[in-house]
Amino acid sequence: MIRLVDVVKKYEVNQSQSVVALDGINLEIKKGEVVVLRGSSGSGKSTILSLIAALSKPTSGEVVVGDERISKLPDSFASDFRRNTIGFVFQKYNLIHTLSVEENIILPLVPINLDAKEIKVKLERVLGMFHIAHKAKQLVKNLSGGEQQRVAIARANINNPQIILADEPTANLDAKLSLSFVEIVKELKAEGKTIVIATHDPLFFGLDVVDREIEISQGKLL
Amino acid sequence: MLLTPEVLAILVLNLLFGLFGAVAFLLSLKIFLKWDADATTPLQYTLEKQSFLAATIIKYIFSVKVPLFAFFVFTLDKISGVITGAMCAAGVVDATQSGMYLIALKIINLYLFASWLKLHSIDMSDKNQPYTKLKFGLFLLFFLSLLLELVLDFRMFGGIEIDKMVSCCGSIYSSSSTSALSTLFKIDNALLLSLFYGNYFLILLFFFLKKKYLFGMLNTLFLPLSLVSLILFFGTYIYELPSHHCPFCFLQADYYYVGYFIYLSLFLGTFHGMMIGFMPKVENGYKISLLFNSLYVILLTLYVLFYYFKNGVLL
Amino acid sequence: MRSRINLYIVEYAINSLLRQKYKTLFIGLVLTLLIFLLSSVFFITNSMKHELQATVDALPEITVQKIKAGRHDEIDVDVIDAILELNGVESAVARVWGYYYFQNAGVNFTLVGIDEYEEQYKKSFVAAASKLDFTKPSMLVGEGVKRVMDANYYKEYFNFIKPDGSLKRVDIGGVFKAETELESNDIILMSKESVREIFDMKENKATDIVVRVANFNEVATIASKIKLLYPDTRVITKDDLKISYQNIFDYKSGIFLALFTTALFAFFIIIYDRASGLSSEQKREIGILKAIGWRVDDVLREKFYEGFVVSLLAYVVGITLALAFVYIFHAPFLREIFSGYSQLKTSFALPFVLDMQTLALLFFLTVPLYIAAIIIPSWRSATLEADEVIR
């Protein structure tokens, strides 16, 4: 499903200096797998997520998702791929606070100009799935942390993507909410989704639902 | 020098076009020389970003230029009130040496920019963006053409002398005058009309046969033929005057602004037709092209028919 | 279809504008003010042009003035006879008129003399001639003049001061009205005899001579013939006047515009600067949008919709305010710049003139400029590195 071949990613600090974020990564993740990327901050695990999502391009090497060499896609195709295939769950939820729950969730659909009916069908599916239908019209800023998390996950699932990428999903959650996130991961796994979680939260280490743990340090897999 | 608010507005916008166009030109040059779709260098990523800026600028210039062209003709019409002897835009165009070429150049530039945008959208809908180098290379040329237009614009308004006596359109577009256009009047109406309608029916034929190159060529030919027959023959029926041949007067309110509709349908029809012939991978557009070309032909033919039914004779 | 107008993005754009209230408000206000100023100026000049054209339209085809030492001088009445002999001339009338400076109010009146049994060169004078009492020193005054005189307690009569310092008393016989207010506002009509007395002109002299021509096409020929007959005259045709009026106004608004372009340039810089400054919050937002599948083109489009909403709103509000300012409140301050001599003239109301072309002109001078100013900043934010939101 996801394949990284000899991937190197450098960030230019200035004209002469550059930082190596990933240094020759080879990685394959199968369909339906739940993978945890372990590592301290700055180890390069978030960079791997952004490469899989085609948010950034590798300095060398190749990223293939399904049959698509996404590291070669121009912006418009990369964006379409991201919208249809990838669901992103961010560390700080990254919701837009002045919009309502509904408006936040349908944000990925805004550029494709669907008609109102189609949007409604998709919206109701995820509202029900993540138990936030009763808050649909409220502004996000009035929600509790756990509710905001569910909105963020609902948004990631609006297009029913095959791959879910989560970046430090429990960093801002208390113990109870963190556990409920693990439950959600189980549900998504049951639906056959491929899930990649980048985290240094020990909660995920040795969990049943996790198929594989990969340790990263200084841009290399250990 | 003529400094009316309208002229100033056109000049200010021209300045903007020149400035932004120059930015797009420099970016295009860089992209044209250094674009490498396979590279993963920071330079290539920067170029990819910059290609968006260049394309946005070109889109901006085109989308302002289209309504500005109408405003330009409008302005010439207004200035005609100030210039002795000129009664509509045609007189003003005549008041300067380069007026006629300027109008022609403006039309050509509209076609060039529209086709650039077409190529751009074809390029963007392909995963490999195969025409990126080509389109930015083409813009290098198109920009020069734009620059020439801007310079001519400036020279035209700078060159208009209010006190100078100029011809009114009646004398420019008539067979007895000595202007360059008058040689056209030696063409026989019957010959011209058979060419015009013949061309149209060939377009119709190749619409059904779907031969794209011939369809494109015929549309290219149709544009000048239409303009000439409009001035020489159909115009007189719009004005219902045998000697009035002006291609600008029917843009005025007296003729219900029908000119804008005539020119717009001619543009849309021929442009889409040309795109089918000359652009890679354009398959649809036959219908739009035929629709607007037909609208053009039918509208002008109706003017003649109505005149005939009303008066029982032809002009 | 991505090419259609996407209402969802429009909605998002409006929401985004509301989120940055102060920035939006600031830019909106500056733009509205600019459009307001510009449209006020155009409305004023258009109205004045309209008034002047109407005035000129009412004039005879040709005016003949005598020039002496490069200045306008009194002309001999005999000239009329020679002009009348030219083929195609319908009539020729000697005009006696001039400006009278009324020091107490600091304004100029235009004194115009008419004769009872003469062919009147303006339509509005025909009615006035039958109303005016020619048996004693009497006058008809325009509305503006009437107001000024009332304010200075001249209700029944007015004392004109003659060049030698003595007074000439003239009764106010009524109010004079013409088609346009600009035409009649500052005018005082009285008999030619009285005007000559006030200005100390001789019986056989006139201010100028106006000539009517039956066939419009012969105007130029007749004008040149008069010029040949009397080389010391200036012969002005109606067309000349129209063009010079048009030029005066275009020139004035041209100068204003030249100044205005500096303001536009400053505005351009302000917008560019404002649109460039992205808060970390806005950067994060664009990052989110791209991470969930917005294209660079979608973000660009959203930015342009924002620009359109702001500039179109400012356009509509600015023009509406200008219409109210000019036609309801009579454009205080601004009008004085354009009437020029208004300090010396009595004030008058502007007629309502609004045409498509002015609206188009206003549009082209503002909206595309605003959009141009946001191109580069919008592109910058649309191509921000999106992976920053997850780093």
Image (tube, helix red, strand yellow):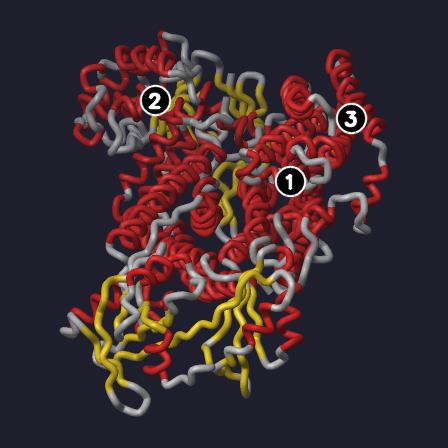
Give the quarter of the figure containing the N terminus of chain B: bottom right
Label 3: few (<14), some (14–19) or many (≥20) C-alpha neighbours in 10 Å:
many
The residue that disc 1 covers is B110
Tell which of B25 and C192 is nearer to you: C192
First-in-chain label (3 vs 1): 1
Same chain check for tags 2 and 1: no
Residue C234 in percent (x, y) is at: 57, 75
Q: Chain of mark 1?
A: B
Up the image or down, A114 lies above or below C154; here it is above
Q: Amino acid at mark 1?
A: Leu
Residue drawn at 43 percent across, 43 percent down: C381
User: Residue A106 — which label?
Assistant: 2
Report which quarter residue C197 is drawn in. Answer: bottom left
Q: Is residue C367 visible?
A: no
Residue A84 in percent (x, y) is at: 46, 19
Residue A143 in percent (x, y) is at: 18, 27
The residue that disc 3 covers is B196
Tell which of C179 and A60 is nearer to you: C179
Residue drawn at 29 percent across, 31 percent down: A95
Q: Is C248 positioned to the left or the right of B212 in the image?
A: left
Q: Amino acid at mark 2?
A: Ile
Question: Are dots 3 and 2 in contact, CB under 8 Å?
Answer: no
**Which element is circle 2 on?**
loop
**3D distance between C-alphas at marks 3 and 2:** 54 Å
Q: Chain of mark 3?
A: B
> Which label sits in the foreground, 2 or 1?
1
Residue closest to the far bottom: C164
Q: Amino acid at mark 3?
A: Phe
